[in-house]
């Protein structure tokens, strides 16, 4: 565990990840530009799911660089990075199944979003998430699902439009999985540590 902490919490590693996540966040918002241009103002904050998840993690990394923790943002980052990381990988693989092709951008999205989920899990030992932090993250995440699939603000994957009901159902349960994962990896374990 000591070597694990030494590597992941090394300031150079944190700075490198910080830069990568800042650049990825900027590109993510750019990727959503056409959808954002036609999104009603009241929904704008809920549409760019993946870049907002990586933005949360940018703040987590900045706090780590400053030797601090911000548990509410850690909870939001952990839940959303896992959820949207896995979601984008699955949607791109589903697009491949439907179309039979995988273009370079789709491959890049699979790799980058898979990395989002992985980094969230790798840094989980350093989060200080309690049940009330996770509750806020859970409300945000499930509310986002309602905005996406009830008010139809979900990310646009043209070839998958015919499967929106199934995707909405999958997304809801992916949210539940992500929330439970954070509970298991952080909230429950912190309770166990306090009990000793």
Image (tube, rainbow, N blue to C red):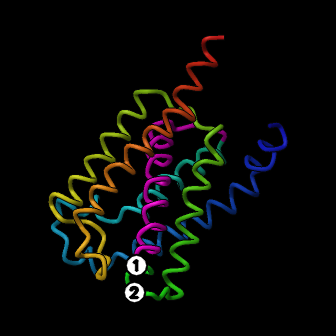
Q: Which mark is residue 95?
A: 1
**Magenta segment:** 67-95
Q: In screen coordinates, is 187 left or right of 98? A: right
Q: In screen coordinates, is 128 left or right of 158? A: right
Instruction: Give me the residue at 69% from left, 54% from top.
Output: 14
Instruction: Give me the residue at 59% from left, 45% from top.
Output: 63
* CB under 8 Å between discs 1 and 2: yes
Q: Quadrant of residue 2?
A: top right
Q: Quadrant of residue 95?
A: bottom left
| Vertical comparison of 101 with 43: above or below | below
Q: Nearer the viewer, residue 97 or 188?
A: 97
Instruction: Give me the residue at 50% from left, 40% from top.
Output: 181
Q: Quadrant of residue 192?
A: top right
Q: Which quarter of the image is occupied by the N terminus?
A: top right
| Vertical comparison of 9 with 28: above or below | above
Residue 20 located within the stretch drawn in magenta: no
Q: Which residue is tagged 2?
A: 99
Q: Disc 1 on helix, strand or loop?
A: helix
Q: Which quarter of the image is occupied by the C terminus?
A: top right
Q: Which mark is residue 174?
A: none
Measure the alpha-carbon separation of dots 1 and 2.
6 Å
How far across and how far down the image is residue 57, in percent?
Answer: 52, 53
Report the residue that reaches farthest toward the top: 196
């Amino acid at each position: 565990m000591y070597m694990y902490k030494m590597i992941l919490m090394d300031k150079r590693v944190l700075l490198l990840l910080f830069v990568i996540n800042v650049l990825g966040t900027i590109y993510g918002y750019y990727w959503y530009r056409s959808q954002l241009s036609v999104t009603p103002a009241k929904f704008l904050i809920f549409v760019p799911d993946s870049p907002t998840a990586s933005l949360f993690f940018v703040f987590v990394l900045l706090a780590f660089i400053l030797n601090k923790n911000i548990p509410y943002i850690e909870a939001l980052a952990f839940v959303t990075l896992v959820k949207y990381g896995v979601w984008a990988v699955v949607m791109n693989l589903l697009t491949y199944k439907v179309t039979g092709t995988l273009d370079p951008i789709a491959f890049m999205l699979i790799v980058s979003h898979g990395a989002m989920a992985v980094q969230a899990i790798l840094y989980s030992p350093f989060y200080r998430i309690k049940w009330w932090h996770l509750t806020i993250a859970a409300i945000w995440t499930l509310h986002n699902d309602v905005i996406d699939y009830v008010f139809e603000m979900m990310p646009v994957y043209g070839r998958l439009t015919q499967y929106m009901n199934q995707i909405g159902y999958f997304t809801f349960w992916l949210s539940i999985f992500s929330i439970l994962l954070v509970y298991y990896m952080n909230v429950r374990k912190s309770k166990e540590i306090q009990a000793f």
